[in-house]
Amino acid sequence: MGDDVQFRKARPGDAGTMLSVKRAAILGIEDDRYDEDQLAAWAPDGGNLGAFEASPSADQYEIRVATIDDTVVGYGVLHLPEERLDALFVSPFYAGAGIATTLLKQLETAAQFAGIERIELTSSLTAVGFYERHGYERTGTTDREIEGVTVPFVAMARRLAPEDPQNDG
């Protein structure tokens, strides 16, 4: 990759850049499975900043960021009580550099430490292959209504713990 990527827990001051990364990642999708109206509705605007600012300090979330020169270039959000991956976005400029994979692995490790055995997520149509390469399986499809526009997604899940753990009591 050449750039020095660092990974750390998110801080409240990261919110604006995280929002920008999500917006750029969504608007950077070049795939005919989503049209311009769907991408524009899905991409966040500044109105979402309050929720982004509150998330890093909330106990129910594990949020990891990837930075280059102290600038957030990717992030992932694990909702601990819901046992769900809520977000995983990387700036389009760094797509394919392994950042998303590292963030995903860090969040899966955090989930295991929290006692989570199965992670669920809702994937964009374009990210399904990425998640399948990391052991996630499709569990269904879902549509979200965003600003009056229907945006299709795929529900997925992965078991983190063995099906039959040895219990010697």
Image (cartoon, rainbow, N blue to C red):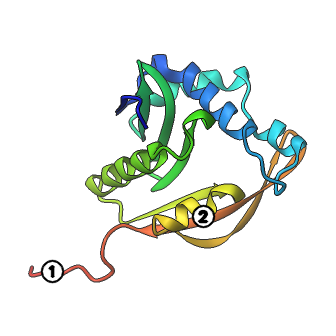
- In the rendered structure, the answer to whether residue 116 lies left or right of residue 15 reads left
Is residue 82 visible in the rendered image? The answer is: yes
Residue 158 is tagged as none
Instruction: Looking at this view, name the residue that lies furthest to the left.
Output: 168
Look at the image and tell me in which quarter the C terminus lies: bottom left
Residue 117 sits in quarter = bottom left
* Picture coordinates of residue 93, whole percent (x, y): 60, 33
Is residue 58 visible in the rendered image? The answer is: no
Q: Secondary structure at mark 1?
A: loop
Look at the image and tell me in which quarter the N terminus lies: top left
State whether residue 20 is above or below residue 169. Answer: above
Q: Which residue is mark 2?
A: 129
Tell me the residue at 45%/56% (across/down): 83
Instruction: Looking at this view, name the residue that lies furthest to the front.
Output: 2
* Picture coordinates of residue 168, whole percent (x, y): 9, 81
Q: Secondary structure at mark 2?
A: helix
Q: Nearest the camera: 31 or 16?
A: 31
* Picture coordinates of residue 167, whole percent (x, y): 15, 80
Q: Nearest the camera: 144 or 71?
A: 71
- Under mark 1, the amino acid is Asn
Tell me the residue at 74%/25% (across/down): 45
State whether residue 147 is above or below residue 144. Answer: above
- In the rendered structure, the answer to whether residue 156 lies left or right of residue 58 reads right
Mark toward the start of the polypeptide (1 vs 2): 2
Between the C-alphas of marks 1 and 2, the distance is: 35 Å
* Picture coordinates of residue 73, whole percent (x, y): 51, 30
- Under mark 2, the amino acid is Gly
How many numbered discs, if any?
2
Tell me the residue at 82%/57% (across/down): 33
Q: Give neighbour class at mark 2: few <14, some 14-19, many 20+ (Cα, 10 Å).
A: few
Q: Which residue is mark 1?
A: 167
Asked whether disc 1 touches disc 2, contact meaning CB atoms under 8 Å apart, the reply is: no
